[in-house]
Amino acid sequence: MHLLDKDVGMAGASAIAAGAIPIATGAALSFQLKKQKNIAMVYMGDAATEEGACWEAVNFAALKKLPIIFFCENNFFSVCSPIEVRQPPNTEIFKKAAGFGLASVRVDGTNVLAVFDATRQAVERARNGDGPTFIEARVYRWRGHIGAGDDSASGYRDPAEIKHWETYCPIDRFYDFLIKLNLYSEADRTESEEVIAEEISEAFEHAIASSNPTEKDLYSYIYSE
């Protein structure tokens, strides 16, 4: 929850809901002031739009026409709370953002090409000096809030709902699209999955075979001592 990699331009993640949004907005401001070509992009969940920091950042970005993309993954849940108990009926998040005067769109988050196209247009808009974009991608969360398990047994959602959304797998939909255009084959997919499975297996084996951390490791990769 606290990842940082400046080598690839990742300014950091925050465990605080909406915490990364003002940080990314500040980064976009620095790009603008330094006349750099960089673009900031921040990902958030639907619950982040219930925090004041989100809309303060959106307002500021629109006011200053900052080069930033706000990407909201609306999966209809905040931990175990459905969006219906958190936001008024028929709320459309992307329209809230549009009210601040920036470009705002909603896309099918299970459609890889739709997400790519919306993001590409947002990048072009930012690079042309036309300011920020807000993208709302509606996409369901199959797994539990934490980890890869299924927590629907707790009763907060119907397992049948999960089964329904599993039929809209982004990966399967993209595979089908590529195969239909003869750009990919089932054999290619099988080979790719085997390579991925092997890479994951090797990672597990490396972790299991590695020695346990020592006390001195507590001081590695930290900001200060």
Image (tube, helix red, strand yellow):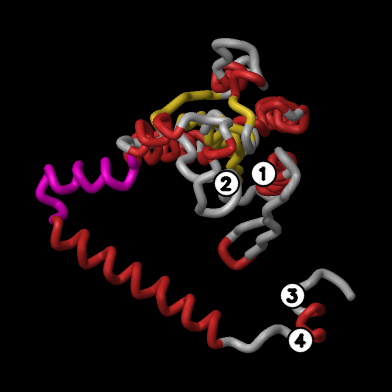
Q: Secondary structure at mark 3?
A: loop
Which circle marks residue 214 in the picture?
4
Judge depth for marks 3 and 1 and give the one in front. 3
Give residue 224's quadrant in the image: bottom right
Label 2 sits on residue: 39
Within-10-Å neighbours for mark 3: few <14, some 14–19, many 20+: few
User: Residue 35: within the magenta?
Assistant: no
Judge depth for marks 4 and 2 and give the one in front. 4
Residue type at mark 2: give it: Ile
Q: Position of residue 18 (x, y in %)?
A: 71, 38
The residue located at (60%, 59%) in the rendering is 9
Label 3 sits on residue: 221
Range of residues picked out in magenta: 169-185
Q: Position of residue 40 (x, y in %)?
A: 60, 46
Residue type at mark 4: give it: Thr
* Magenta stretch secondary structure, dominant: helix
Name which of mark 3 and mark 2 comes first in the sequence: 2
Q: Secondary structure at mark 2?
A: loop
Name which of mark 1 and mark 2 comes first in the sequence: 1
Q: CA distance from mark 1 to mark 2?
A: 6 Å
Which circle marks residue 28 in the picture?
1
Kindly check if marks 1 and 2 are in contact, taking CB atoms under 8 A apart as contact: yes
Residue type at mark 1: give it: Ala
Residue type at mark 3: give it: Tyr
Within-10-Å neighbours for mark 4: few <14, some 14–19, many 20+: few
Judge depth for marks 4 and 3 and give the one in front. 4
Within-10-Å neighbours for mark 1: few <14, some 14–19, many 20+: many
